Image (cartoon, rainbow, N blue to C red):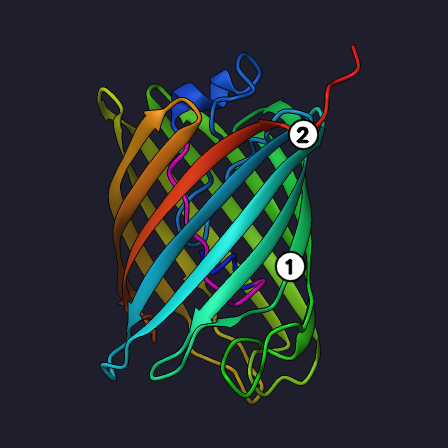
Amino acid sequence: MTIGSQFAVASFSVAITAASIGAQAADPRTVQPERPTVATHAGTVAPSILEIETGVERDRPGSGITSFNSVTELKIGLADRVQLNLYAPVARPSESSSRLGDFAMGVKWRVREDVPMLGKLAVLPTVKLPTGSESNGAGTGTTDVGFLLISSQTLGPVALDLNFGYTHRFGTDTIAPRDATLWTVSFGGPVVGNLGWVMEWSGYPATSGPAGQASTVAVLAGPTMLARPWWSFDLGVIVPARGPQPHALYVGTVFNVGRLWARTP
Protein backbone atom coordinates (compact mmCIF):
# COMPACT_ATOMS: atom_id res chain seq x y z
CA MET A 1 0.00 0.00 0.00
CA THR A 2 1.01 3.31 0.08
CA ILE A 3 0.63 2.42 3.73
CA GLY A 4 -2.20 4.80 3.69
CA SER A 5 -1.00 8.27 2.93
CA GLN A 6 0.65 7.86 6.30
CA PHE A 7 4.04 6.74 5.11
CA ALA A 8 4.16 7.67 1.41
CA VAL A 9 5.77 4.35 0.54
CA ALA A 10 4.40 1.15 -0.96
CA SER A 11 3.26 -1.96 0.89
CA PHE A 12 1.86 -5.19 -0.43
CA SER A 13 -0.13 -8.15 0.80
CA VAL A 14 -2.79 -10.72 0.11
CA ALA A 15 -6.52 -10.32 0.64
CA ILE A 16 -7.72 -11.79 3.90
CA THR A 17 -10.62 -14.14 3.23
CA ALA A 18 -13.69 -14.83 5.31
CA ALA A 19 -12.22 -18.18 6.31
CA SER A 20 -8.97 -16.74 7.65
CA ILE A 21 -10.77 -14.08 9.69
CA GLY A 22 -12.51 -16.78 11.64
CA ALA A 23 -9.39 -18.99 11.79
CA GLN A 24 -7.09 -16.55 13.53
CA ALA A 25 -8.05 -17.72 17.03
CA ALA A 26 -8.09 -21.42 16.11
CA ASP A 27 -4.60 -21.70 14.57
CA PRO A 28 -1.94 -19.06 15.38
CA ARG A 29 0.16 -20.24 12.40
CA THR A 30 -2.55 -19.29 9.89
CA VAL A 31 -1.35 -16.23 7.98
CA GLN A 32 -3.19 -12.95 8.56
CA PRO A 33 -2.21 -11.14 5.34
CA GLU A 34 -3.29 -7.54 4.95
CA ARG A 35 -4.64 -5.89 1.81
CA PRO A 36 -2.53 -4.89 -1.16
CA THR A 37 -1.63 -1.20 -1.51
CA VAL A 38 -3.76 0.86 0.83
CA ALA A 39 -6.29 -1.04 2.92
CA THR A 40 -5.84 -3.35 5.88
CA HIS A 41 -8.16 -5.49 8.01
CA ALA A 42 -9.06 -5.57 11.69
CA GLY A 43 -7.39 -8.92 12.38
CA THR A 44 -4.20 -9.32 14.45
CA VAL A 45 -1.66 -12.10 14.73
CA ALA A 46 -1.76 -14.22 17.89
CA PRO A 47 0.33 -13.22 20.94
CA SER A 48 4.09 -13.96 20.53
CA ILE A 49 3.65 -14.76 16.81
CA LEU A 50 5.91 -13.11 14.20
CA GLU A 51 4.61 -12.65 10.69
CA ILE A 52 6.62 -11.14 7.81
CA GLU A 53 4.96 -9.43 4.87
CA THR A 54 6.90 -8.09 1.88
CA GLY A 55 6.42 -7.17 -1.77
CA VAL A 56 7.41 -5.01 -4.72
CA GLU A 57 5.37 -2.52 -6.75
CA ARG A 58 6.26 -1.15 -10.20
CA ASP A 59 4.73 2.27 -10.89
CA ARG A 60 4.40 3.82 -14.35
CA PRO A 61 2.77 7.27 -14.33
CA GLY A 62 1.57 9.14 -17.40
CA SER A 63 5.08 10.54 -17.96
CA GLY A 64 6.30 7.03 -18.72
CA ILE A 65 8.99 7.17 -15.99
CA THR A 66 9.11 3.85 -14.14
CA SER A 67 9.89 3.53 -10.43
CA PHE A 68 9.92 0.66 -7.94
CA ASN A 69 8.93 0.57 -4.27
CA SER A 70 9.10 -2.17 -1.67
CA VAL A 71 8.13 -2.58 1.97
CA THR A 72 8.91 -5.29 4.49
CA GLU A 73 6.49 -5.34 7.40
CA LEU A 74 7.01 -7.24 10.65
CA LYS A 75 3.88 -8.01 12.65
CA ILE A 76 4.35 -9.18 16.24
CA GLY A 77 1.47 -10.24 18.49
CA LEU A 78 1.81 -8.42 21.81
CA ALA A 79 -1.43 -9.60 23.42
CA ASP A 80 -4.86 -10.85 22.44
CA ARG A 81 -6.16 -8.35 19.84
CA VAL A 82 -2.98 -6.20 19.99
CA GLN A 83 -0.26 -6.26 17.29
CA LEU A 84 2.98 -4.32 16.81
CA ASN A 85 3.67 -3.27 13.19
CA LEU A 86 7.19 -2.34 11.99
CA TYR A 87 7.66 -1.02 8.42
CA ALA A 88 10.98 -0.88 6.54
CA PRO A 89 10.52 0.55 3.01
CA VAL A 90 12.93 0.60 0.09
CA ALA A 91 12.48 3.07 -2.78
CA ARG A 92 14.05 3.04 -6.23
CA PRO A 93 13.12 6.21 -8.11
CA SER A 94 13.64 6.34 -11.87
CA GLU A 95 17.30 6.12 -12.93
CA SER A 96 18.43 5.81 -9.31
CA SER A 97 19.70 3.03 -7.04
CA SER A 98 17.56 1.48 -4.32
CA ARG A 99 17.61 3.29 -0.97
CA LEU A 100 16.07 2.76 2.45
CA GLY A 101 13.00 4.88 3.03
CA ASP A 102 11.30 6.27 6.12
CA PHE A 103 10.97 3.73 8.94
CA ALA A 104 7.53 3.54 10.56
CA MET A 105 5.84 1.74 13.42
CA GLY A 106 2.31 1.31 14.70
CA VAL A 107 0.13 -0.67 17.09
CA LYS A 108 -3.09 -2.23 15.84
CA TRP A 109 -5.72 -2.75 18.54
CA ARG A 110 -8.89 -4.68 17.76
CA VAL A 111 -11.27 -2.77 19.99
CA ARG A 112 -14.52 -4.66 19.35
CA GLU A 113 -15.43 -8.02 17.84
CA ASP A 114 -19.06 -7.55 16.77
CA VAL A 115 -20.20 -3.97 16.21
CA PRO A 116 -23.59 -3.66 14.47
CA MET A 117 -23.13 -2.83 10.75
CA LEU A 118 -19.31 -2.67 11.19
CA GLY A 119 -18.26 -6.13 12.39
CA LYS A 120 -14.75 -6.20 13.85
CA LEU A 121 -13.49 -2.71 14.69
CA ALA A 122 -9.79 -1.81 15.10
CA VAL A 123 -7.63 1.29 15.37
CA LEU A 124 -4.04 1.66 14.13
CA PRO A 125 -2.08 4.71 15.35
CA THR A 126 1.29 5.08 13.59
CA VAL A 127 4.49 7.11 13.68
CA LYS A 128 6.86 7.56 10.71
CA LEU A 129 10.40 8.83 11.21
CA PRO A 130 12.48 10.86 8.69
CA THR A 131 15.12 8.17 8.14
CA GLY A 132 15.05 8.18 4.31
CA SER A 133 16.93 10.57 2.01
CA GLU A 134 14.86 13.48 0.72
CA SER A 135 17.30 14.35 -2.08
CA ASN A 136 17.16 10.82 -3.49
CA GLY A 137 13.38 10.52 -3.32
CA ALA A 138 13.41 7.90 -0.54
CA GLY A 139 11.95 10.03 2.27
CA THR A 140 9.70 13.00 3.00
CA GLY A 141 11.90 14.66 5.65
CA THR A 142 8.95 14.73 8.06
CA THR A 143 7.84 13.01 11.22
CA ASP A 144 4.31 11.73 10.59
CA VAL A 145 1.60 10.85 13.08
CA GLY A 146 -1.27 8.85 11.61
CA PHE A 147 -4.49 7.22 12.73
CA LEU A 148 -6.40 4.53 10.84
CA LEU A 149 -9.93 3.35 11.67
CA ILE A 150 -10.66 -0.19 10.39
CA SER A 151 -13.88 -2.16 9.99
CA SER A 152 -13.94 -5.82 8.88
CA GLN A 153 -16.86 -8.14 8.36
CA THR A 154 -17.92 -11.12 6.25
CA LEU A 155 -20.76 -11.26 3.74
CA GLY A 156 -21.13 -14.98 3.18
CA PRO A 157 -17.80 -16.13 1.66
CA VAL A 158 -16.69 -12.55 0.94
CA ALA A 159 -14.67 -10.36 3.33
CA LEU A 160 -15.35 -6.63 3.39
CA ASP A 161 -12.84 -4.15 4.86
CA LEU A 162 -13.45 -0.41 5.27
CA ASN A 163 -10.65 2.03 6.22
CA PHE A 164 -10.48 5.73 6.96
CA GLY A 165 -7.16 7.38 7.81
CA TYR A 166 -5.71 10.76 8.73
CA THR A 167 -2.05 11.84 8.80
CA HIS A 168 -0.38 14.98 10.13
CA ARG A 169 3.25 15.72 9.25
CA PHE A 170 5.71 17.74 11.33
CA GLY A 171 8.47 19.49 9.37
CA THR A 172 8.68 20.78 5.83
CA ASP A 173 5.68 20.38 3.53
CA THR A 174 7.54 20.77 0.24
CA ILE A 175 7.64 17.00 -0.51
CA ALA A 176 4.47 15.75 1.19
CA PRO A 177 1.38 17.72 2.32
CA ARG A 178 1.02 18.77 5.94
CA ASP A 179 -2.30 16.95 6.34
CA ALA A 180 -3.73 14.06 4.35
CA THR A 181 -6.66 11.66 4.50
CA LEU A 182 -7.55 8.39 2.78
CA TRP A 183 -10.46 5.99 2.39
CA THR A 184 -10.68 2.39 1.15
CA VAL A 185 -13.34 -0.19 0.34
CA SER A 186 -11.93 -3.69 -0.16
CA PHE A 187 -13.35 -7.11 -0.93
CA GLY A 188 -11.75 -10.56 -1.02
CA GLY A 189 -12.83 -14.17 -1.17
CA PRO A 190 -12.12 -17.70 -2.40
CA VAL A 191 -12.22 -18.91 -6.02
CA VAL A 192 -11.30 -22.60 -5.92
CA GLY A 193 -8.98 -24.59 -3.68
CA ASN A 194 -6.17 -22.36 -2.42
CA LEU A 195 -6.83 -19.62 -4.99
CA GLY A 196 -8.62 -16.40 -4.07
CA TRP A 197 -9.32 -12.90 -5.36
CA VAL A 198 -9.17 -9.32 -4.15
CA MET A 199 -10.65 -6.04 -5.36
CA GLU A 200 -10.12 -2.64 -3.80
CA TRP A 201 -11.21 0.96 -4.29
CA SER A 202 -9.04 3.57 -2.60
CA GLY A 203 -8.95 7.33 -2.61
CA TYR A 204 -6.86 10.25 -1.41
CA PRO A 205 -8.88 13.48 -1.09
CA ALA A 206 -7.22 16.65 -2.39
CA THR A 207 -4.48 18.23 -0.27
CA SER A 208 -3.11 21.77 -0.02
CA GLY A 209 0.27 23.48 0.36
CA PRO A 210 3.43 23.34 -1.79
CA ALA A 211 3.09 19.55 -2.18
CA GLY A 212 -0.70 19.58 -2.52
CA GLN A 213 -2.34 17.37 -5.15
CA ALA A 214 -5.76 16.85 -6.65
CA SER A 215 -7.86 14.01 -5.30
CA THR A 216 -7.10 10.52 -6.63
CA VAL A 217 -9.08 7.29 -6.87
CA ALA A 218 -7.66 3.92 -7.90
CA VAL A 219 -8.96 0.40 -8.47
CA LEU A 220 -6.94 -2.71 -7.66
CA ALA A 221 -7.63 -6.33 -8.63
CA GLY A 222 -5.71 -9.59 -8.64
CA PRO A 223 -5.49 -13.23 -7.58
CA THR A 224 -4.17 -14.62 -4.31
CA MET A 225 -2.78 -18.05 -3.43
CA LEU A 226 -2.38 -19.82 -0.10
CA ALA A 227 0.63 -22.10 -0.69
CA ARG A 228 0.60 -23.31 2.92
CA PRO A 229 -1.51 -22.30 5.94
CA TRP A 230 1.49 -20.19 7.02
CA TRP A 231 2.62 -18.91 3.57
CA SER A 232 0.69 -16.96 0.93
CA PHE A 233 1.30 -15.04 -2.30
CA ASP A 234 -0.47 -12.38 -4.36
CA LEU A 235 -0.09 -10.28 -7.49
CA GLY A 236 -2.23 -7.82 -9.38
CA VAL A 237 -2.69 -4.50 -11.13
CA ILE A 238 -3.62 -0.99 -10.00
CA VAL A 239 -5.48 1.25 -12.44
CA PRO A 240 -6.17 4.97 -11.91
CA ALA A 241 -9.83 5.99 -11.91
CA ARG A 242 -9.28 9.71 -11.22
CA GLY A 243 -6.37 12.07 -10.59
CA PRO A 244 -2.57 11.66 -10.86
CA GLN A 245 -2.43 7.99 -9.88
CA PRO A 246 0.10 5.84 -11.80
CA HIS A 247 -0.62 2.48 -13.37
CA ALA A 248 1.09 -0.19 -11.29
CA LEU A 249 1.87 -3.89 -10.98
CA TYR A 250 2.57 -5.55 -7.63
CA VAL A 251 3.65 -8.93 -6.25
CA GLY A 252 3.94 -9.92 -2.60
CA THR A 253 4.19 -12.70 -0.05
CA VAL A 254 3.30 -13.27 3.62
CA PHE A 255 5.07 -15.76 5.89
CA ASN A 256 4.06 -16.73 9.43
CA VAL A 257 7.36 -17.48 11.22
CA GLY A 258 5.84 -18.80 14.45
CA ARG A 259 6.29 -17.99 18.12
CA LEU A 260 9.08 -15.69 19.29
CA TRP A 261 8.55 -16.65 22.92
CA ALA A 262 6.54 -19.19 24.89
CA ARG A 263 3.15 -17.97 26.04
CA THR A 264 2.38 -17.98 29.73
CA PRO A 265 -0.72 -20.13 30.44
Amino acid type, mark 1:
Ala
Magenta-colored span: 6-16
Where is residue 249 shown, x and y percent of the image? Answer: 26, 59
Q: Residues within 10 Å of mark 1 (few under 14, many from 20)?
A: many
Residue at left offset 36%, top offset 68% = 68
Residues tagged 2 and 1 counted as in contact (Cβ below 8 A)? no
Task: Specify whether 2 is left or right of 221.
Answer: right
Which image quadrant: the N terminus? bottom left
Residue at left offset 53%, top offset 15% = 27
Q: Earlier in the sequence, mark 2 or mark 1?
A: 1
User: In the figure, residue 199 lies in which quadrant?
Assistant: top left
Instruction: Say which element carries label 2.
Output: loop
Where is residue 85 shown, x and y percent of the image? Answer: 63, 46
- The verdict on residue 125 being magenta is no
Is residue 223 depicted above or below 7 in this figure?
above
Where is residue 178 shown, x and y percent of the image? Answer: 64, 77
Is residue 196 depicted above or below 146 in this figure?
above
Cα gap from disc 2 to disc 1, whole angstroms? 21 Å
Q: How many numbered markers are drawn?
A: 2
Kindly identify which residue carries mark 2: 260
- The verdict on residue 15 being magenta is yes
Is residue 231 depicted above or below 209 in this figure?
above
Seen from the viewer's position, the closer of residues 210 and 194 is 194
Amino acid type, mark 2:
Leu
Task: Specify whether 53 is left or right of 145.
Answer: left
Query: What is the chief secondary structure element of the magenta stretch?
Result: loop
Residue at left offset 58%, top offset 88% = 174
Kindly identify which residue carries mark 1: 104
Instruction: Say which element carries label 1.
Output: strand
Residue at left offset 38%, top offset 27% = 17
